[in-house]
Image (tube, rainbow, N blue to C red):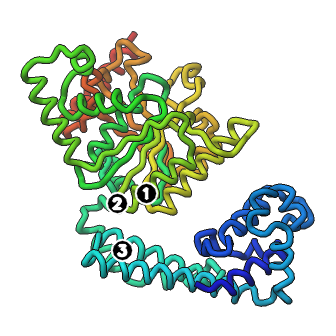
Amino acid sequence: MNLEAERAALGALLKDHELMDECYLSAADFSEEEDHRTIFKVLQYAKEHFEGVKDPFDPVLLVSQWGERLQKIGGMTRLINLRSSVPTTADFSHYQQSVRSARIQREIQEIGQQIASSGGGDLSELQLKMNKLAELQRGQSGSGYVHMATTLEGHEHTIMRRAESKGVTGAKTANDEISQMSGGHQPGDLEIIAARPSMGKTQYVLNDMDAVTKAGWSAIIFSLEMRSLKLVERLVACIGGIKNKKIKSGLMSDNDWDSYSKAVEIIASRNLYIDDTPGATVEYVRQQVKQLKKKHSKLVVYVDYLQFLNTERKFTKNHERIAYITKVLKGIAREFEVCVVAISAVGRDPEKRPDKRPLLSDLRESGDIESDADVVTFLYRDEYYNADTAKKGIVELIVAKGRDIGTGTFEMIFQSDTGRFINLTKEEKEKLAEKVRQHEQAHSKR
């Protein structure tokens, strides 16, 4: 712990607020002693929200905004003393480097204590902590740039591991073709699953969670629209191949009960989590992901759905709220190295077109969602609009945006009574293509 360096860093920031632009520290870098962490959080907030003010770190302004909070830790006198204790801001880079180094040493000691007390502990958790320390050390220079060659150190081993995984380097998705195209759900990515109502968005996500956890990953879904029991019942029906209406009515045969028992055993054996906290905020989601990531290094996070997610911040316009939430979700994906999959609503514009398939511009608050997402996949069922379609029981997965992976359309069988999404075999794809061709020929002759 280097309290002197912390005082100097805070004093320099109070003396020159523009130093915050080159400050790579976070509140976690400061100790809770002498309330340094609280003071830094106040400065962070002031810098962000007092834009345009000549000196957002003016002690008078800060105390007027956070009077009671700051009075408890010394008030204006404390802030003035901190600011005057630093004769020059020229050494700010040295101050913050010392603060970061002290934090790294604290965390190294904690890891050593954990290893000593647990005989090694959870190796995956320890590896995550060591990776985090490496990131902190890389950020210590205050400059984010590195020579490109340094990013390729040990890269040949990464390529070899990709080859061993047969191309699926992330968590396997519900659709085999998308898994091959994308390499699976990739840590750090924000994916959007979107569709008009009744297309099966939530049900597809449940199938996806089944595939993810079957492959050994962990998954959590934040259910903002549906209570947990109802959602888990759907997952039981999907895994067990039981008709949803039988579970709802309770009128199940002996075979259904056998399938039910097996499905419940499967769910119990996997790392499947659900959180249906009413009015959940994106800040709450971040806290829960942070805790769960400590237990499970390979994690996929689902949000059902994006437009129902709240935030502790206040916005007058809904599109601004969604823009902020998608950026935070993307930040969660990158910070904790998880894949975040969020369900999104689609506007009514597809209903007005001859071809009802949704486009990126149909996403509600589309500009922000589209720009922040790494992958956007639309679900489309032609039978919903066309009674005589050749694609009865078929759902199209339209990858409309795929950063680094491209785009494409893939088809699956959708069993609406059980909620199962089933991959098509090569023979089934050929038969479907021929059926569609014959259907189009028949229509063209009319």
| 331 versus 38 height, above or below | above
* Side (left or right) of 329 relative to 217: right
Split into 4 quadrants, where in the image is the C terminus? top left
Residue sitting nearer the eye, 169 or 432: 169
Q: Residue at x 62, y 43 (%)?
A: 311
Distance in Å between CA atoms under marks 1 and 3:
16 Å
Q: Is residue 93 visible?
A: yes
The mark lying in front, picked from 1 and 3, is 1
Q: Position of residue 142 (x, y in %)?
A: 66, 81
| 283 versus 103 height, above or below | above
Q: Are marks 2 and 3 in contact (CB under 8 Å)?
A: no
Q: Residue at x 53, y 82 (%)?
A: 137
The image quadrant that residue 65 belongs to is: bottom right
**Residue annotated with mark 2:** 295
Q: Residue at x 51, y 61 (%)?
A: 334
Extreme residue toward the top, this view: 446
What amino acid type should be assigned to the residue bearing mark 3? Gln
Describe the element under mark 3 as helix, strand or loop: helix
Q: Residue 127 shows which numbered tag?
A: 3
Q: Are marks 1 and 3 in contact (CB under 8 Å)?
A: no
Q: Residue at x 23, y 68 (%)?
A: 164
What amino acid type should be assigned to the residue bearing mark 2? Lys
**Residue annotated with mark 1:** 291
Extreme residue toward the left, this view: 254
Crowd rating for badge 2 (residues with CA inside 10 Å; few <14, some 14–19, many 20+): few
Which label's residue is closer to the chain start, 1 or 3? 3
